[in-house]
Image: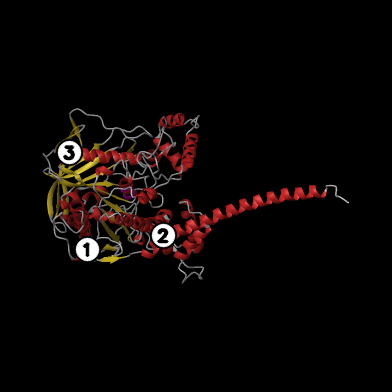
Amino acid sequence: MELLSIFLAISVSTIIVVSGQNPRVTVTEGNLIGKTVRFSENQFINVTKNVDMFLGVPFASPPTRFAPPEPMTHWEGDRNATEFTSACQQRPQPLFYPVISEDCLYLNVYTPSPKPSGMPVMVWIHGGNFVAGTAMSYDYYGVPLVAFGDVIVVTLNYRLAIFAHFSTEDTESPGNYGMLDQAAALKWVYNNIEAFGGDKNQITLFGGSAGSSSVNFHILSELSRGFFNQAILQSGTAIGNGAFKHDPVAELEKAQELGREMGCEDVVSTSALVSCLREVEDPVALSTAADKVYAEGYPVTMDGTFLKETPTNLYKMGNFANVPILIGFNKDEGTLVPYIFYPDYHGGPTAPPINRNAFENIIKGSMANNGRDDEIVYDSVFQEYIDWTMADDPESDYFQSWVNFGTDSNFACPSDSVMRRHVEAGVTVYKYYMTHAPSKSVRMYGDALPNTPWLGAGHAEETIFVWGLPFIDELYYYRGHNLTDEENALSVKFMQFWTNFAKSGDPSKSSVGGEAGVGEDSWPLYTIPELKHKELSLDLGEGRAVLARQCHFWNEYLPALEAFTNTIDDDEKEWQESYDDWKDDMTDWQQAFEDYKQQTTCN
């Protein structure tokens, strides 16, 4: 039976190397030799096409640690571009990324074969909380998208964790190297994509999780705005918790602490500190020490080059790229954090139980980590997320409250804020809300990581469908396979919507002058006050105003409350200063009165 099921899967979808074909392109730095594969799927996509792949293409020179990327130098002869290169240096995860290196600034290009002309381009930025991940993976294998959607797909690497983030808050090491890597890759694609048959004026940037936040940062950065003309944001923004932080004093202190951890003699001189850390030969030892010092938090910061202002201020000033966007999030994004914190429940049918005390501590910790350390603010969040129908029961389970809190505060409501800013600027916006819980989670990985049903429509689950994982043979024993027929068909719809947007700027149209889709192929424009979205489920319906009350709480009420409490603090400080001045005056008056009483009186 097992052999039969494998045979049926392979007969439905096959990807084979086409022998005797070695596609060749000439880019700025020299010649590239790729390979051609034939993609054939005869049940859900019904397509057989050749796809050219150019893998491990350098878009910059091997980077100097804690320095911006430099252009790749010219090479002589033909460069082999037929295999993935290494993932960027990160915490070792041999199961997922067997080869990691600081020499990692490479990208992959997937294009229809024979070479097209003027083809729309989609550039993917992977997620991983800015600490993990790679483009050198079959999880982001562009072949199904290219074969189905008639687009060119590019996936790119960028530096991660301390190697992307380290800053001394001066010119010795300004930081944001991961974002500068991405900007360099976008510039390279813009300058070279025509050699692959792409249209440099029709580039859609898309990403998931931290990759989605990255897309948002590029919308805000003057450095990279000119290299794309559309964007897709999947569960991540520049204003979400943990994506951005600017605290120069704390950054310098952490940099110095890292120097002490690594045995640097002089941590006061930033030049000496950077030089010392560059000389550390073991990158794993360096990253391990950094994870301890930085608590594994490496947000984007304000470096003066990639980002000259905070994301919030840039949006307030209207200083962002006015490009069409497709943006959305999943119903159960908030199951991500419990999944990370409770590994004993991986593969189990039920989620970890959370009592009220634990829930309140989780809320306080999360809020404090994001600069919201105020009892009045805590109480308002408790009022919003405690289920008061069961609050009197000490045995009540607050797991769903935790999930709702995480979904709303980290994903849904930052996305809501971003899409509103774009609509107010007159930009075309399409919104999605994914409610389908896959029968096999994207976090499943063969026998090593079993399927976890309680994740629901969790964080990153949409990538199964966007990338057509059910149709990638290389993932058969790992993830994205053994889904239902309805889910396989849903993956085709996701690919249709995403590539339609790349081609026409409208997920319901396959071309600029094409007919808008109807029924399950329709997709409403997101406008205010209509607030319509596409629901990504097996029914592919539409809805409106999802989580509107919750997002008003996070985006309007809570900031107003914080402003009010800050005003109270200022008033109290002013009152205290006035009281201190009064006490000083009273002391002076009392002394003068005592002096007066000692004077000789007249008889």
> The disc labelled 2 sits on which kind of residue?
Glu
Residue 556 is labelled as 2
* Mark 2 secondary-structure assignment: helix
> The disc labelled 1 sits on which kind of residue?
Glu
Would you call the spot at circle 3 few (<14 residues within 10 Å), some (14-19), or many (20 or more)? many
Q: How is the image coloured?
A: secondary structure
The one nearer the camera, 320 or 106, is: 320
How far apart, in angstroms, are the residues tagged by discs 1 and 2? 40 Å
* Mark 1 secondary-structure assignment: helix
Picture quarter with the N terminus? bottom left
Q: Which residues are magenta?
A: 211-215
Would you call the spot at circle 2 few (<14 residues within 10 Å), some (14-19), or many (20 or more)? few
Left or right of 22? Residue 564 is right
Residue 72, by quadrant, is top left
The one nearer the camera, 532 or 102, is: 532
Instruction: Point out the tag, 3 or 2, that comes first from the N-terminus.
Output: 3
- List the residue tagged with mark 3: 34
Residue 152 image position (x, y, % from top left): 18, 46
Left or right of 200? Residue 590 is right
> The disc labelled 3 sits on which kind of residue?
Gly
* Mark 3 secondary-structure assignment: loop
